[in-house]
Image (spheres, rainbow, N blue to C red):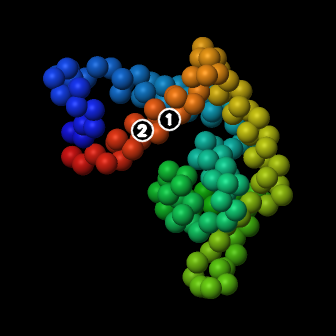
Amino acid sequence: MIQKNPQFTQTWPQRPNGIAYLIGRLDHVLNRRIRDALAPWDVTAAQYTALSVLNSHGQLSNAQLAERSMVSPQSANEMVKLMETRGWINRESAASHGRIIHIRLTRKGETLLQQCDAAVVQVERALLAELDESQFGPLHAQLRSMMRGLSGLTL
């Protein structure tokens, strides 16, 4: 177990404390709410994530998009084909390497993303409704710390 805070050496419980369960429940409910929010546009949570990632990065290869969208390369490939068919993205060969295909948003994809963003903002508002605005920054930092902790964990 990775332990950066030495104060927990003596006080850490021998049984799970329920935090992982709560995070799992939160993930489950959040995913359901996001799916419901995106349903009017026939967009999945994975597609929304991919559109957001492409918007942030400009253009990416399929492998980069898969990793940043948290899906397998095979799932990303199928998702990209569907998104291209719907006119949300373009694919074109990289000038430097013909086998690499760059993916980028179209105007239609940008417009769709703006509509979906507005719906997801409503979900986030509900998620954070019981927090003070001053707690958002520390919460974000704590969640990132948790991700770093698990990213370094080897079993």
Q: What type is the residue that disc 2 sits on?
A: Ser
**Residue situated in front as seen by the camera: 44 or 94:** 94
Give SS at disc 2. Answer: helix
Q: Can you give x and y, in whole percent of width and height, for residue 135 in the image?
A: 57, 22
How many numbered tags mark residues here?
2
Q: Can you give x and y, in whole percent of width and height, for residue 80 in the image?
A: 63, 61
Q: Can you give x and y, in whole percent of width and height, for residue 122 in the image?
A: 71, 27
Left or right side of 99 for 23: left
What is the CA distance from the residue labelled 2 to the residue labelled 1? 6 Å
Left or right side of 108 for 3: left
Q: Residue at x 67, y 65 (%)?
A: 59
Dot 1 crowding, Cα within 10 Å, few <14, some 14–19, many 20+: few
Q: Are marks 2 and 1 in contact (CB under 8 Å)?
A: yes
Q: What type is the residue that disc 1 sits on?
A: Ala
Q: Can you give x and y, in whole percent of width and height, for residue 120 in the image?
A: 69, 33
Q: Is residue 60 above or below residue 55?
A: below
Left or right side of 34 for 64: left
Residue extending furthest top?
A: 130
The disc at residue 145 is: 2
Q: Is residue 40 visible?
A: no
Q: Residue at x 73, y 67 (%)?
A: 90
Q: Which residue is mark 1?
A: 141
Q: Is residue 96 visible?
A: yes
Give SS at disc 1. Answer: helix
**Residue situated in front as seen by the camera: 124 or 40:** 124
**Residue situated in front as seen by the camera: 41 or 90:** 90
